[in-house]
Image (tube, rainbow, N blue to C red):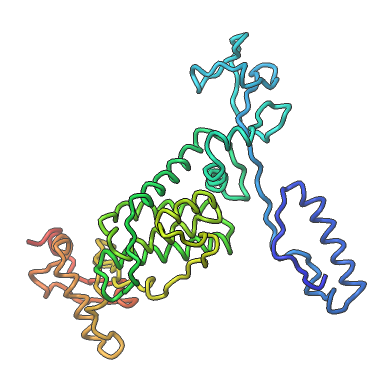
Amino acid sequence: MAKMPVDLYVGGVEHAILHLLYARFISKVLSEEFPNAAFSAQKAEPFKRLLTQGMVQGKTFKSSTTGVFVRPNLVNLKDPAKPVHLQTGEPLSISFEKMSKSKYNGVDPKATTDKFGVDATRLYVLFKAPPEDSLEWDDQSVVGMQRFLAKIHKAASQHKPNLSKINLPEMCDRQRSLYRFIHQTINDVTCALESDFKLNSAVSHLIKLLNRLTDEHHLSRYPVYHHGLATLIKLLAPMAPTSSEEFWELIHPSSPPSVLSEQWPKVDPLALKDDNVLCVVQVNGKRRFNITLDKSKFPPSASQPQAFHDFVKAAVLSEPTATKYLPVHDTNLIKRVFVLDSGKLVNFVVASKIPKKVV
């Protein structure tokens, strides 16, 4: 009890009325009977957090008339949307229900892992649904995780590593944008695993990072691309350790230590610092369009508020889109300009009688 409470209790909903109830009852009794350090009031609750995981549900075939469950090998799936009994021709209903021998909807784990691989199967289970929701098992969907791992293998096998040190100031805009995306992914995956337990979100973020690296393959000769690929593999390792080990060796041909002995990637605060600001432009209080402002060109808004105000106004009026909504050739019709939230919002108050498009 000295190390109570437990950080996390994971159990199905049926455990909430058995094991969990007993644990809470015993803990509260002990905290009242022995009000010492080991059983203080702060430790009366035995668990800090409860996660009730959902059930894995299998595709179930049932007679529409009798409600009797039918074995899959007795189902004619010529038309998957309208299954019929193979022997009687009776229409059958399809539903996803808790896996059970009596419902003939179980899945053999060994057969699945032999067919798709352990890592692909595990990733599918993590990705298919949040841990607290029910998971509707579908063999065909596991193929998606196979393809995901195959794309990483292709990227790793074709990669020629550039192990030079990352130098953020020397990066071009595309490299800096990729670097920012990599570290945003590190932050998102870490939060999903440690704080939210949204394991499906963690896999989703890794898929997005792989897609971004694929789109930015022209940067593969730069250190930032190697950094991105290595980060992807490190983040993937807890969920697909066998495949990650293979990918790690492909991008480190000189026999590196195991990827599982690597430190978890850390977020670079400078990477998350955006160089641009998305500015929402309103005309008479109505949102019309957005522009992107370069922070490097900002005058100091605190010491020179008027200069910053004029900079944002000029940037908006110089946009081609502005001609649709603002009198760019007759600024006397602009009565006032409000620049708010450090340039994230600007509102133009203009004369009511101006044409929709000024040319």
Tell whether 184 sits left or right of 74: left
The quarter of the rendered structure image containing the N terminus is: bottom right
Q: How many marks?
A: 0
Residue drawn at point x = 52 percent, y = 43 percent: 120
Quadrant of the rendered image containing residue 45? bottom right
Residue 51 visible in the displayed image: yes
Q: Is residue 277 left or right of residue 112?
A: left
| Residue under the image location 60 percent in, 22 percent down | 93
> Can the viewer see residue 286?
no
Residue at screen point 65% across, 22% down: 62
**How far across and down, in percent of the image, does residue 336 sit?**
21, 77
Q: Residue at x 63, y 32 (%)?
A: 107
Question: Quick one: 53 or 167, which is closer to the camera?
Answer: 167
Q: Quadrant of residue 356?
A: bottom left
Farthest-out residue, bottom? 303
Which image quadrant for residue 303? Answer: bottom left
Q: Position of residue 259 (x, y in %)?
A: 51, 60
* Residue lying farthest to the front in this orientation: 254
Q: Quadrant of the C terminus?
A: bottom left
- 216 and 301: which is toward the camera: 216
| Left or right: 1, with 259 as reference point | right
Q: Residue furthest right?
A: 33
Percent x, y of residue 83: 55, 19
Q: Position of residue 274 (x, y in %)?
A: 33, 71
In terms of depth relative to the viewer, which is nearer, 93 or 163?
163
